[in-house]
Image (cartoon, helix red, strand yellow):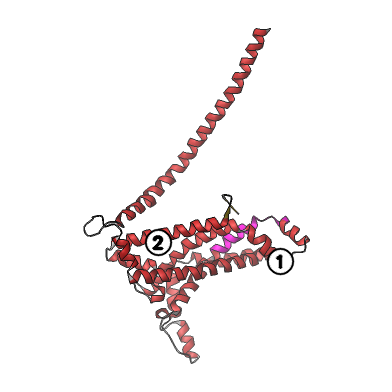
Amino acid sequence: MKQNYFKKKRKKGKMRKNPGNLFHGREWKMALRGIGFVLPSFAGVCIFMLVPFLDVLRCSFTSVATGKFVGWNNYQMVFTNDAFLLAGKNTIRFLAIGLPLLLVLSLLLAVFLAEWGRMGERLKNMFLFPMAIPVVSVAMFWELLFANKGFVNAILHLAGGQESNWLNTNAAFVILIGSFLWKNLGYDILLWMAGLVMIPHSVYEAAMMDGAGKIRCFFSVTLPNLVPSFFVIAVLSLMNAFKIFREAYLVAGDYPHESIYLMQHLYNNWFRELSIDKMSAAAVVHAIVIGAFVIILRKLCTKDGELL
């Protein structure tokens, strides 16, 4: 009886041990399978982004003429360069005005369209239309409106007003902001509406039963639940903001009015002059500033390591 008892106990122990080993093996296979799926994308990021950036970092500490290590000399040249200071100031100004306007307007329009149901869905598609227009067509449209013989000046002439070359005045900055909002508003509206769908309707019902109106629900229910969406939309909008250079370049060329001379104009001109060392130093500073902005924004939007 004792021998049979111990045999049964050993068999039970083996049965308990084997499933654990099998499960551990499955986890290991799943991990390897996951690495296999991620590896091609990771290799692409390394080859096309990480390795080139490391080379840019190397070039920022060397002289393009001699190829020798020069330390911080390139960074000193960049921070004392008038063109860099002007481009940096204009880029920061553009982001400080354009990004908040885009985020606020798109959020308000998304909430408004969400209240309209099916009609809101149709209007949302209308806001997405500018994304389908090629950049060259957008540039030609703005030039057609604001050039010397453009549509705006023609209306001013008929009304007895004073004509102006809008793209060569401080008004060029306002036109650039308008182009940025017009181009990216629909994309941000779509992202905000995706975040609004994720908020349970029962939360609004509970708030209304407690006496909260639409405005109170917006500030106490909608905004707190949209913090994760805000972080993603803000980062994507920041990336899209640097694409506005295409319109500015196609409309005004290499050297536009000083109010819209952006970092991308500077990089383009330095690349044409083969000032790779200065361009590399400026690009590293640019990357550090963007990285710091994203880290600070994530810190503000997270609590206990998770998005609010």
Question: Mark 2 belongs to which amino acid?
Answer: His
The quarter in which the C terminus is drawn is: bottom right
Look at the image and say whether residue 188 sits in the magenta stretch: yes
Q: Relative to residue 244, is residue 112 drawn left or right?
A: right
Q: Earlier in the sequence, mark 1 or mark 2?
A: 1
Gap in Å between the C-alphas at discs 1 and 2? 41 Å
Q: Marks 1 and 2: which is nearer the front?
A: 2
Q: Relative to residue 158, is residue 121 drawn left or right?
A: right
Residue at point 33%, 59% (across, down): 280
Other-residue count near label 1 (Cα within 10 Å), few / some / many at <14 / 14–19 / ≥20: some
Numbered tag placed on residue 214 in the rendering: 1
Instruction: Assign a secondary structure to mark 1.
Output: helix
Q: Are marks 1 and 2 in contact (CB under 8 Å)?
A: no
Residue 189 occupies which quadrant of the picture?
A: bottom right
How many marks the image carries: the answer is: 2
Question: Mark 1 belongs to which amino acid?
Answer: Lys
Which residue is nearer to you in this view: 151 or 198? 198
Look at the image and say whether residue 37 sits in the magenta stretch: no
Q: Which residues are magenta?
A: 187-202
